[in-house]
Image (cartoon, grey):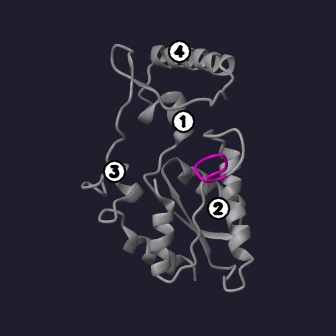
Amino acid sequence: MNIGLYAQQMATYGFVAIAFDPSFCGESGGEVRNTASPEIFTEDYSAAVDYVGLLDFVDRERIGAIGICGLSGMAITADDTDTRIKAVATLSMYDMFRDMSRGHMDYYTEEQRSKIKKYLGEQRWKDIEAGTYALGNHEIASNENVELLAEAMEIPAELPEADHVDLYDNMEKIPFEKLERFFKDNLI
């Protein structure tokens, strides 16, 4: 996904925009790498507000946030706990933590969940024995025979010509005009 693309486009509409990689991911610093922490990712949004709020050309009463994919939930949580965030828009949103434990749209059976948890536990032993970081849960789907496999996300009904990942970086399918209108209407 390319949050920098969103920031760049929102800047063309006159917004002050900042893009950041969540802690421990992408260009962000820190160790353990490539891990997911809802508490830390939520704090990342507040830290971004800290940064832009110190810029003398930013109106602190008109700060918004955009969350994409699994980070959408963290943007909403940050908005709920940080009153400085006045509006939040999300795209390709889903609850990645529920998906990890129950599957997208809760499709894992108890047998599948048990098999996945066993697999993840065994993988953590392999990771730590190899001297690498155990990275925790990840979405692992299985078919009707409880064979582990990857599955595509569901296409949202309101964007029938776009799939989940189209909204990461497909300029022709991302509804930037709706985002512009939303923030101009809600950051007043």
Label 4 Cα neighbours within 10 Å, binned few <14 / some 14-19 / many ≥20: few
Measure how far apart labels 1 and 3 are at the Cα level: 18 Å
Dot placed on the residue nearer the N-terminal end, 2 or 3: 2
Label 3 Cα neighbours within 10 Å, binned few <14 / some 14-19 / many ≥20: few
**Near-viewer residue (185 or 97):** 97
Measure how far apart labels 1 and 2 are at the Cα level: 20 Å
Residue highlighted by disc 4: 114
Measure how far apart labels 2 and 3 are at the Cα level: 24 Å
Does the magenta stretch mainly form a helix, a strand or a loop? loop
Name the amino acid type tagged 1.
Answer: Arg
Residue highlighted by disc 2: 79
Residue highlighted by disc 3: 156
Dot placed on the residue nearer the N-terminal end, 1 or 3: 1
Measure how far apart labels 2 and 4 are at the Cα level: 35 Å
Q: Are marks 2 and 3 in contact (CB under 8 Å)?
A: no
Residue highlighted by disc 1: 98
Measure how far apart labels 4 and 3 are at the Cα level: 29 Å
Q: Are marks 4 and 3 in contact (CB under 8 Å)?
A: no
Residue drawn at (53%, 16%) of the image: 119
Q: Secondary structure at mark 4?
A: helix
Residue drawn at (43%, 35%) of the image: 104
Report the magenta residues as a range.
22-28
Q: Secondary structure at mark 2?
A: helix
Measure how far apart labels 4 and 1 are at the Cα level: 15 Å
Query: How many labels were placed on the picture?
Result: 4
Dot placed on the residue nearer the N-terminal end, 4 or 1: 1
Name the amino acid type tagged 4.
Answer: Ser
Label 2 Cα neighbours within 10 Å, binned few <14 / some 14-19 / many ≥20: many
Residue drawn at (50%, 83%) of the image: 14
Q: In this rendering, would 34 be left or right of 43?
A: left
Label 1 Cα neighbours within 10 Å, binned few <14 / some 14-19 / many ≥20: few
